[in-house]
Amino acid sequence: MKLKTRETLTAYSLLIPTFLIIFFVNFYPLFRVFYLSFFKKIVGSEEVFIGFKNYISLFASDIFWKVVTATVIFILSAVPLKMLLGIGLALILNKPSKLRPILRNIIILPWALPVYVSAYVWVWLYNPSLGLLNKITETLGLGHYYWLQDYPMLGIVIVNVWQTVPFVALAILAGLQSIKQELYEAAAIDGAATFQIFKYVTLPSLKQTLYILTALQILWTFGEFVTIWILTAGGPGYATKTLPIYIYEKTFISQDLGMAATLSVIALPIFLMIVIYVIRSLRG
Amino acid sequence: MLKQTPKLVAAIEAKTLPDLMYIEGTALGAVAEEGKPKYVIPVDDLINEVGKDDFYEQWLDFYKMEGKHYLFPIDAFANLTHIIKPMLESVGIKEFPDSKGPIPKSWNDWEEFAKAYKKKFPDKPVFGLTLGPGAGDGSESWEMVWWPYGGALMKSQGKAGITFKSEATYRTLERFLDWWDKGYFPKDAFSTDGFYNNNCYLAEITPMIVEGPTPYYAAVTRNPELAGKTILTGCPSGPAGSITYTSEDGFIIFKDSPNQDLAKDFILYFVKDKDAFMDGFIKPTFGGLSPVFKSIGEKLKAFSPTWKFIIEDIEKCKPANVSWTYNLPSKAADTIHWDFTYPTMLSRALIDRIPIDSAIEEAYKHIVEVFESVYGY
């Protein structure tokens, strides 16, 4: 055997363990979920092949469409808000100031806290009888609110935005700091106003970062579970029953693995499109 | 339960079930149903060894299927009405229509009280019941009103056994809507806080709650003043009688365990010295857990008036669990209770204001889906 062939074989053989791990950790579960979606599979029972029946009954189910609606509303409300607030915060943090290091540390706190902990903090903030939010609104004469009951979607959007804006802001800040100073100087010499500088220099330079961040935020918001489960458990009614909550219920409460797999498979193309978008954005 | 089931589900699928497990009895449906005791073995030999006659029959037979016992009962609990006496007395009703005395015994009595209480305190809620998802209390609140008015989920396995859609269901939902609109429930009753109703009692927000004796236990240990002004009575009754939401915990031994003998030894060791079991396990809960052994029950009755009341109440109650009126472990009934079908229906009617018929139909469709998925017929 030639030396080059032997080296190539050695190289491939060294990759085998990694391939195996990736296969069993990433691809096998994916195939298994896809496979299960064509079966009636209740925990502890045999798998029974039923073709597309899970898909058909899901699309015919009113609850499924309520779940899709809640998921879309959640994403469309939370993601733009995170991006806008993230840009705003990043611009503030980008201004030279003695307080900048302290501000950065304070702002990162919500993101640094375990999601579980911050969700419970918000449960108490929202508490109608004892919560801080009602104390504030009452002191200001703005009334008394049943936040998670009357405005459940708004309630979870606020918490989700609060938790993730620091990450968005820091990522944008990194993008801002990589913009060449000369561009700003040139724009200033040409007499550009602050907003024009932002529109024609800052935003185009941040385009790549914003694309990737938006895609990531759609992915992460789509997959949000802990906060919603702790704050509203998907309720009241179907108001905050997003796809991950519904999948969890189908898996661990209904123990209907076939249907849970079908729901996951339906979510897959959406995820894939976002991933492809992210990869293409990364390639520039 | 919500934390226990995912572990059980994962262990069944991964074939990594333990030797034995201490579970809430209603969860037994996940591993054994009538005709399908798939994963667990009967524990009749253990029950006989400990002394079958010493068990309260109602607890022992609660999870008996086809003549065999699959759960070794350890403790039980039954819901009780916690009443804050000064709040009850504040309206001055001396005789309620059904109880014929100063303490309300039926939902009818409680409605009378609520009317008078709201008249005197228009801004204060009356019934400290959880209506939302979170823990199982929202489901229990529905069941505790629904059952005494003749409602029930099922009478047998399979879709044909569903008894959910009935006049009783319609009337009960109508009643909840009426109570909600009249402000009898706190406005945040749809909270997901699993301790919501407990807090209504502990923070003295409402004159009454219905719950296992755990809130009373909390009062005894943390707020003796509140405990001192608390009246404990059975669950409010309705035309169908006093049907109490009850559950019991116990040990199950898994069929595939290579250590079944060790598991049995462990259970025997746990309860063999009944005095030690009583002192170490039951008594410190101040009624939060009730005994399943008559001998312990008798000792506790003599120990304190509160224990006497709790045990006598349990002895008298008509125990019901999530599968009432079928009253055997049922995975379908367990799912309906724990996936918050009832709280969802309540919030659809009370908050989203969809018509009662539609809310019931929506819940019914879901119940049928669950039954089809569990029983396939």
Image: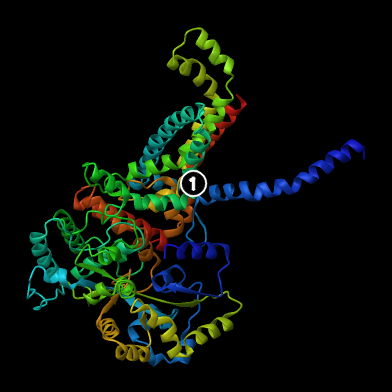
* Lateral position of residue B160 relative to residue B101, left or right: right
Q: Is residue B52 visible?
A: yes
* Residue B122, picture quadrant: bottom left
In the image, what residue occupies the spot 44% across and 86% down? B277
Q: Position of residue A212 (x, y in %)?
A: 54, 31
Check the residue under mark 1 and report the chain it is in. A
In the image, what residue occupies the spot 38% across and 87% down? B293
Q: Nearer the viewer, residue B131 or B57?
A: B131
* Lateral position of residue B150 relative to residue B157, left or right: left
Quadrant placement of the N terminus of chain B:
bottom left
Q: Which residue is mark 1?
A: A264
Q: Position of residue B249 (x, y in %)?
A: 41, 76
Q: Position of residue A58 (x, y in %)?
A: 40, 47
* Residue B216, picture quadrant: bottom left
Q: Nearer the viewer, residue B49 or A194?
A: A194
Please, what secondary structure does the residue beneath circle 1 have?
helix
Q: Nearer the viewer, residue A91 or B102?
A: A91
